[in-house]
Image: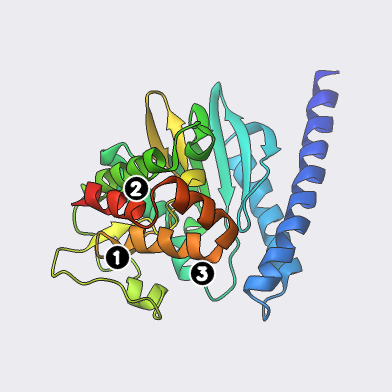
Amino acid sequence: MRSGRYARARMEAAISCKFHCNRLAEHWQGYWPATDAAELAADIEERLAAATAAWGLRSIEPLDGGMLALTCAAMQNDRPVVLKLNPRGHRDDRQLAAEGDALAFWSDTGAAVELLDRRDDGFTLLQERIQPGQSLDDAGLSAEARLTELGRLAARLHQAGPPPSSFMHVSEFAPDWDVPRNGDEEVLAHLDLHGGNALRAGGSWKVIDPKGVRADRHADVLDLAKTLEWTRIRARAELAESGGWPGLRRMADVLG
């Protein structure tokens, strides 16, 4: 009976993962129209099975949200973990493969999710499951307070010091950006730092889902400004609540 329950649970997890891969494939096709989305999905499903066996994972449950990676909650022994499988075989391979390197680079800061292990040249990541895991956006804070917290998180990440040249530079990642150059030492910028990618970890916050790009320390502020600009409806509410663009200035002030 017990083996039957486990087999049924594995089958249900596989069906759920296939459903989520099909959902993600629509986004992949938009990002990388020259890439076969079905091949990306098949590769992720194969890596999911291999990672599950290699790391002894159970109770695998795909998480909603996200537009690129298949992310699953799981258990390893008695520890809650997160399994993240980034798609590979497209023009952004280099950047996505470096996510684990970014988390490892920031490990001593305590401001990023802990990387437990990785496989498949960095495209398959095993991470801690942050507890309680509430996002900054859902914490009931004002927009001004959220921007301040994001600034503090960025400053903590930057304490890791100058990153090695193996990380992609912002001029390659976003060649059309007018990134400020103040003559300061470059840092490893998150470049997707918003309230949905900052999770409550005990009494503090940790970031997830970084791009991990070498840049000026204020690049994260520019990135958030562009995110608000792209989502104009939300931007109006966010900027009005935080006092307009000076709200972003407060985030920059935290960075120094």
Q: Is residue 93 left or right of residue 52?
A: left
Per the rendering, the mark at residue 214 is 1
Q: Nearer the viewer, mark 1 or mark 3?
A: 1
Tell me the quarter of the picture where residue 189 sits. bottom left
For the residue pair 20 and 97, the one nearer the viewer reads as: 20
SS of the residue under disc 1: strand
Mark pair 1, 3: CA separation: 17 Å
Q: Measuring 19% from the left and 58% from the top, which residue is drawn there?
A: 162
Q: Which numbered mark, 2 or 1, is in the foreground of this view? A: 1
| Quarter of the rendering containing residue 234 | bottom right
Q: Which residue is mark 2?
A: 104
Q: CA distance from mark 2 to mark 1?
A: 15 Å
**On the image, which quarter does residue 63 sit in?**
top right
Of the image marks 1 and 3, the number of the one nearer the N terminus: 3
Residue 96: x and y in percent read: 49, 62
Lateral position of residue 204 relative to residue 186, left or right: right
Q: Quadrant of the N terminus?
A: top right
Q: Residues within 10 Å of mark 3 (few under 14, many from 20)?
A: few
Which residue is rendered at x = 49% and y = 65% of the image?
229
Q: Residue at x 32, y 63 (%)?
A: 219
* Residue 12, position as x, y percentages in the image: 82, 37
User: Badge 2, how many Cα within 10 Å: few under 14, some, many 20+?
Assistant: some
User: What colour scheme was applied to this rendering of the protein?
Assistant: rainbow
The residue indicated by pointer 3 is 93
Q: Is residue 164 above or below residue 90?
A: above
Q: What's the amino acid at mark 1?
A: Arg
